[in-house]
Structure formats: structure tokens, C-alpha cells
Amino acid sequence: MTLTTIYMIAVFAVFTCSLIIYAWIAGYGRTRLVNVERLVYKEETPEPTKPGIFDQIRSFTKRPTQTVDNVNGEDGEITETDAEIATRIQDRFSILGYLAEQVINNELRSLIIAGPPGLGKSYTLDQALLEHDPEKERHTVIKGYIRPTGLYKMLYERRNEGDILVFDDADSVFNDETSLNLLKAVLDTTEVREVSYMSERRLKDDTTGEMIPKTFEFKGTVVFITNLDFDGIIEKGHKLAPHFDAMLSRSHYIDMEMHTEQDYIVRIKQVIDLGMLKDRGLKPHEIADVIQFIEDNASKLRKLSLREAIKIADLRKSGKSNWKKVAKATTCKK
């Protein structure tokens, strides 16, 4: 074999090896690229939103599954008469009135009032607070959304003995662990209740313009008026259940015991009997018509509430012959 032939074979072998190595590297590189691309896609693509606390826990805001018929014993078992339901609910509101007095007299550190929306659970406390503090110098009512920073500022503003801070259907405060930890601190049963917010950013008092300390002693009272069923939350074992259990251990808790459709109807009739529609100028026969409409359409009404009763009453008061047709169109589901 000549040197030229040997040289050509060697060149061919080197070239072949180079192609093999290049192909291997290129293939590995593509694999890495694909893997990296998959990793980035995984990171950039949002995971399906996990149900929040309001989707996972029991709440009074949903229409009760128990209907008028089975409350009255369609299956052969009579549970409660309307009179018994009325007495039970009235007892609860009497207890609420007593607790409201205790709050005003600074005898309670914390009170949680739980029940369905639109059936008067806020009214008793609101009236008591306005009679006690008409200028709202010693109490604040928060409705809607509040962040942990806003909560800390409000707690500082109402930190003094005799101050009252009310969260009325501001249930977003229960969906944040930072807020829950702040609340547990101010609801504590220890003699001295200190609360801290160790954020790098200093907070400013909106009233005085002064900087709020990162730790202060809280001597006020906190009241929650909520649509959430705390017992149901704890029973279901939601991840925030320990926080709710801790709040119950620090607070007086009253469930207004309105859980069925018939409970709702009886409560609406109670408030109407107290003069709610009479005060709006309706005559006795018109009031009777409103009550009958609610009872006849209870399962179809979008909301069984005092607000809905008022809307129906306003239509009846108009005197139009087609008021029922309009009421069904505007307050009932198809």
C-alpha cells in the first residue's frame, strides 16, 4: 500500500469521525434546546387557577339546598313549624342585641356574626353603634376589600380602649394569611395584645400624617359581620381552617341559624311584621300581596332577602296592574 493511499484512508477516517461527532453534538444540542424550551413553557404558562377559599368552603351566600317542601316534611317527617322557626330566629337576634350592647360597653374584645346576606344581621349592630356614637368618632365600619397594609393602619387608628372596628361583609380579609395573623394578634385573650407588621416600608397614619410604629398595643374591639360559615370551614379542613379555629377560640361567635329556604321566608316576614314595608307607605293588602308573591316564587327568586322584598314592594306600591309580571321579570330566574 502506497503512502498516498494510506494518507487518503486516514483523511477519510478523520472526516467520517468528524461527521459522527458533529451529528452527535447537534442532536444533543437540539435535545437540550427542546428541554430548555419545554422548561420555559412550563414556567411561563400559568397553571390552572386553584379554587380560592370562597370556592372551597361553606358559605351562607349560596341558596340552601333544603326546600320549603322538605322542611315541612314532604318525606313524612315534620321538622319545624313556621312559629318554631320564627321563635328560634328571634332568639338569635335577641342574643345579637345583647352582644351588641356588650361591644358598646367594651365588655367584648371580639365578636363574629355569621349568617346569610340581606336578612338583617348588620342592622342590629349598626343601629346600636349609631345610637352610641352618632358622629362615628369611636367606631369605623369597613365594607368591601382591604389589604394587609390597610388592615394594619385601621387597627392602629382604632387601637384605643373603647374604639370599635367593624368588618361588614369584608370577607376578603379572611383570604389572606398575613391579615389573619394580624387579626389573631389583636383578638388574643392575653392581658396585653401587641401586633406587629415588620415590613421594610414604613406606613403612615392617614389622619395625623405620622409614621405608624412597627409594633403597638391594641386595646379596641373588633367585630366581623360575615357570610362565611366558620364551623363549616373548620369541619371541611380547608388549609386556612387552623386560622379560623384560632379566631373562634379568641372571639364570641354567633350563627344566626338561617340555613333553609323556609328560614329565609320566615325571617323576611318577621321584618315585614315589624313595619319595614309599612314605613315605605304600603297598605295592609299591598303588604299581603308582597308576602304572597315571595312565598309563591321562593324557589325562583334570585335572592331571598330583605332587599329583594323591598324591590317587589316598590313595584306593588306603584299600583300598576302588571306589577307581578314586572316583578317576575326582574327578580326571578328563568
Image: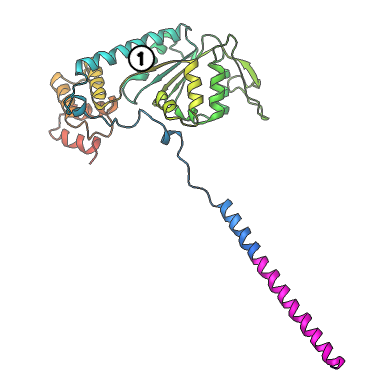
Residue 87 occupies quadrant: top left
Q: Is residue 293 left or right of residue 107?
A: left
Q: Residue 321: x and y, percent?
A: 12, 33
User: Which quarter of the rendered picture does the N terminus lie within?
Assistant: bottom right
Q: Main secondary structure of the magenta part?
A: helix
Give the magenta range.
2-30
Q: Residue 293: x and y, percent?
A: 17, 29
Q: Is residue 290 left or right of residue 174?
A: left
Q: Residue 286: x and y, percent?
A: 15, 23
Q: Tell me if residue 328 comes above or below residue 316 in the rendering.
A: below
Q: Is residue 127 visible?
A: yes
Q: Residue 50: x and y, percent?
A: 47, 41
What's the residue at 58%, 28% (across, down)? 149
Residue 122 occupies quadrant: top left
Q: Residues within 10 Å of mark 1 (few under 14, many from 20)?
A: some
- Residue to which mark 1 is pinned: 124
